[in-house]
């Protein structure tokens, strides 16, 4: 429609697929947060709802970027096999961490795009997802979005990495 | 200082660096041989475009580590909470250093001291860190925010691979801001 950026240069295939991967991760997160929220109450539930909204907003942005590039956004699946069974608060929080880790990794893929707007958008979402993940996890990690083993293991820092300063809010 | 083999410490980092260094070296040789002939050998190869920004990112991590050192020294009561965050900065520094490949003999081989290239409120080891615990935490939060923002600003000027690392490091620093808020309020829920 307006499509200023879309008309100029078509996105590269790698950029399209990075956007689609991020969108697929957002679809899964939007579904997963429904399950997460069902097992939470009070402040944790409010946080889960806010995070769910953030994923919806990001999903809308991705769909719009893909559409203006002439690509068909991947659709959400009717249901997702959850990576873990969810019974109770702790499992729900663990699922939220998993969902955010996957979203973070997907956006890190978008950061590899050469187009500055895509790279910046990806980085912004990497930061946002990492913050949500750390909040659920109760502690930080050195390299959000990178699979374990993709970066140097801690050396002198070993033994401090599993700290867990703030236990997850359990109900 | 320059992240050479003496500081590598891990087998994985060392072997990957060796492979990358070999690749970089052979690429440089091919470029020299292919483009300009023998005369080009007189000119040291110029460093890759990433090198300057990588050095700046390494220097920024040095400064962050020094700031944590200073706060921990001044407020030992915060040490247990701050050490894990400092450890993550050390890992950032190590990973960034492992990406630093400078062709031997290039003009950039002599690494500037990190302190010489930095710009920020407190020099490493300098007495710019507030002594009150609350103020020290706020100081670290602001430093983390600024460090993350600086990395994100440079993101579009580097290679895809370095951009990913810098985005991840920036994200970690952003999470430190919230983690520090929990330290500052001392009694978490």
Image: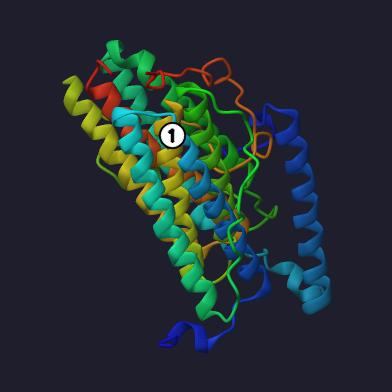
Residue B96 at x, y percent in the picture: 56, 43
Rendered position, B85 above or below A110: above
Res B175 seen here: yes
Residue A159 at x, y percent in the picture: 56, 15
Outermost top residue: B77
Residue B103 at x, y percent in the picture: 69, 55
**A163 and A6: which is toward the camera:** A6
Q: Please give the name of the residue rendered at 50% of the width and 32% of the height, measured from the top-left corner.
A: A141
Q: Which residue is mark 1?
A: A38
Q: Chain of mark 1?
A: A
- In the picture, measured across the screen, residue A18 lies left or right of residue A163, that is right
Rendered position, A135 above or below B115: above
Res B128 seen here: no
**A171 and B98: which is toward the camera:** A171
Q: Could you tell me which quadrant the C terminus of chain B lies in?
A: top left
What is the image's colouring? rainbow
- Residue A18: quarter of image: bottom right
**A136 and A123: which is toward the camera:** A136
Tell me how many marks there are. 1
- In the picture, measured across the screen, residue B139 lies left or right of residue A86, that is left
Q: Please give the name of the residue rendered at 42% of the width and 25% of the height, measured from the top-left corner.
A: A138
């Amino acid at each position: 429609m307006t499509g200023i950026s879309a008309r100029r240069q078509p996105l590269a295939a790698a950029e399209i697929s990075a956007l689609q991967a991020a969108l697929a991760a957002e679809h899964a997160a939007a579904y997963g947060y429904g399950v997460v929220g069902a097992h939470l109450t009070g402040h944790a539930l409010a946080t889960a709802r806010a995070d769910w909204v953030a994923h919806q907003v990001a999903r809308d942005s991705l769909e719009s970027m893909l559409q203006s590039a002439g690509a068909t956004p991947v659709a959400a699946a009717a249901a997702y096999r959850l990576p873990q069974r969810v019974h109770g608060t702790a499992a729900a929080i663990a699922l939220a961490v998993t969902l955010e880790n996957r979203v973070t990794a997907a956006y890190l893929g978008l950061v590899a795009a050469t187009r500055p707007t895509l790279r910046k958008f990806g980085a912004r979402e990497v930061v946002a997802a990492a913050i949500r993940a750390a909040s659920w996890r109760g502690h930080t990690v050195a390299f959000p979005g990178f699979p374990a083993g993709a970066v140097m293991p801690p050396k002198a820092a070993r033994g401090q990495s599993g700290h867990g300063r703030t236990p997850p809010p359990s109900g | 200082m320059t992240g050479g083999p003496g500081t590598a410490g891990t087998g994985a980092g060392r072997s990957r660096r060796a492979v990358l260094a070999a690749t970089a070296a052979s690429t440089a040789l091919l470029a020299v041989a292919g483009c300009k002939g023998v005369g080009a050998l007189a000119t040291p190869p110029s460093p890759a475009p990433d090198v300057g920004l990588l050095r700046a990112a390494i220097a920024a991590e040095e400064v962050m580590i020094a700031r944590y050192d200073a706060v921990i020294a001044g407020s030992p009561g915060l040490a247990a909470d701050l050490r894990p965050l400092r450890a993550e900065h050390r890992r950032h520094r190590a990973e960034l250093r492992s990406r630093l490949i400078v062709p031997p003999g290039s003009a950039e081989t002599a690494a500037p001291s990190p302190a010489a290239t930095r710009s920020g409120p407190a020099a490493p080891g300098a007495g710019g860190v507030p002594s009150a615990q609350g103020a020290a935490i706020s100081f670290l939060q602001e430093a983390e925010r600024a460090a993350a923002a600086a990395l994100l600003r440079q993101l579009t000027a580097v290679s895809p691979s370095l951009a990913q690392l810098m985005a991840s490091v920036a994200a970690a620093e952003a999470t430190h801001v919230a983690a520090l808020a929990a330290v500052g309020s001392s009694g978490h829920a």
